[in-house]
Amino acid sequence: MRTLVGGAIRPRPGDVVLARIARLGHHRHIEQPHGRRSALHVDDLIIVAYADRYATDQFESYVPRHLGPVNLVASGGIASEVHTRSRAVRAATDIVPIGLIGDDAGRPLNVADFRLPTVDTSGERPRTIAVLGTAMNAGKTTTIRHLAHGLARAGVRPGVTKVTGTGSGNDYWVMLDAGAHMMLDFTDAGLASSFRQPTSVLEEVTAQLVGNLTLGGCGVNLVEIADGLLQQDNRRLLQSERLHELIDAVVFAASDAMGAVQGVSILTDFGFDVVAASGTMTASPLAAREAEAALGIPVWGIPELGEARAVAPVLGISPSLLHEPAELPLPAWPVDMLDPDTTIAVPAPDTAAELLSHAGADHAQLPASGAFRPVMP
C-alpha cells in the first residue's frame, strides 16, 4: 500500500479498499491469503475488493457509486452494497471504507492488475470436463474435489479451475488438499467476482484458465461453473461457441432428482454431452436411484467419484493416464497399538542418534532435542 485515494470517486469492480468494521453481521471471519479464517471485531481494519455478488443462499449485491458505508458480503473479502438477502442468513456485516489503495502515483489498485500473463490458447489441450449444477450449494465443488482426489491417486495429474463465482480461498485450498496438480480460479484472471461481467470477458477468462492448466502439465482439466443454469450470466455463457470448443463432457450436480432431470435436459438442448450426474441428491440412495432411472446415465455419490478406474471411461479419460496408486509406506514402529499389553521403549535423542549411526544411516536427520515423542496407545 503506497497511497489512499478518497473523495468523490466511484469505485470499480475489483478496486482494492481499506475499510473499518462498523457492525458484525453474517460474516464474522475473513480469509487470509494463506487460508486462515481470522475472527473479526468492530473497528478492525481490513483490505477487501469491491465486486458484485450473486448468491441465492446469501446476498445479491452491487458495487456502489460512492465510497460511503457498504457491506462485507463474502468472507473471501468482497465489499458491496446488499440489495436482497436470503432469509436464511443474518444481515450483512457493515464496513466503512477509509480509502482505495493506490500505487505511488495515486492510481487505485485493482485485482485485474495482478492477473496471470496472457497465454496462447490455440494449441492442443487434455480432456476437459465441466461440472455444472442446479444452483449454489448443489454439490459442484464437492463433485470436482472427489473426482480430482481419485484421479490424482491414479496418477492422472488433474488440473482444476473455477471460472465463475465470487472469490473464495476455500475453493483453492480444498482442491490442493485433494491432490490437484494445479488449481486456478477467476481471481487469477483478474476478477474478484464474475457476476455481471460480459460474456466475452467470461469466455476469455475460461480460455485463459484452461490454457494455464494445460501449460502447467495437467493430464485432465476439471472446470467448475458456479451457481445454476438459470443464472443469466451462465445462460449466455453456456450458449457460447467458444465455451463449447473448450468443454468435452459435463458432470451435472443437483440437489434432487427433478432438478437433475431438468438440468440435464437444458444442457443437452444447449449441445453439451452430459455423461454423469452427482451432487447433494446422492446423500439419499432413493433420490439417486430416481435420477438414474430417469436420466439413463451414471449417478455418482462421493465413493463412486473417487474411483478413478470406474469414472475415467465415462469421462473419456485415456486408460494410459491411469497408474496403480503407490503403496503406503510401513509405519515407523510396526506395533499393534490396540494391544494394551504392548510397551514401547523410546530411546532418548542421543541414544537414537547412536543407534542410527551404527545402522549406517549417516545422513538420517533426527528431530531436535525435545521434539522426539513416543506414540501413545
Image: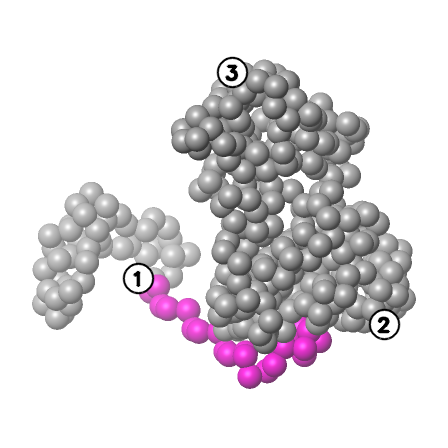
| Residue 362: x %, y % from top left | 12, 66
Image disc number at residue 231: none
Residue at position x 88%, y 65% in the image: 269
How many residues crowd mark 3 within 10 Å: few (<14), some (14–19), many (20+)? some
Residue at position x 36%, y 68% in the image: 330
Mark before the other along the chain sequence, 2 or 3? 3
- Give the extent of the magenta segment: 308-334
The residues bearing labels 3 and 1 have C-alpha atoms spaced at a distance of 51 Å
Front of the two marks 3 and 1: 3
Q: Give the amino acid type for the residue marked by disc 1 in the picture.
A: Trp
Q: Give the amino acid type for the residue marked by disc 2 in the picture.
A: Gly
Residue at position x 81%, y 47% in the image: 232
Image disc number at residue 296: 2
**Mark 3 falls on what kind of element?**
loop
The residues bearing labels 1 and 2 have C-alpha atoms spaced at a distance of 50 Å
The residues bearing labels 2 and 3 have C-alpha atoms spaced at a distance of 56 Å
Residue 249 visible in the snapshot:
yes
Q: Where does label 1 land, which residue?
A: 333
**Position of residue 358 in the picture relative to residue 73 (left or right):** left
In this view, 62 is above or below 270: above
Which residue is at the front of the view, 262 or 117? 117
The image quadrant of residue 352 is bottom left
Mark before the other along the chain sequence, 3 or 1? 3
Front of the two marks 2 and 3: 3
Q: Is residue 328 magenta?
A: yes
Mark before the other along the chain sequence, 1 or 2? 2
Q: Where does label 3 land, which residue?
A: 43
Which residue is at the front of the view, 235 or 306? 235
Task: Say whether marks 2 and 3 touch (CB < 8 Å).
Answer: no
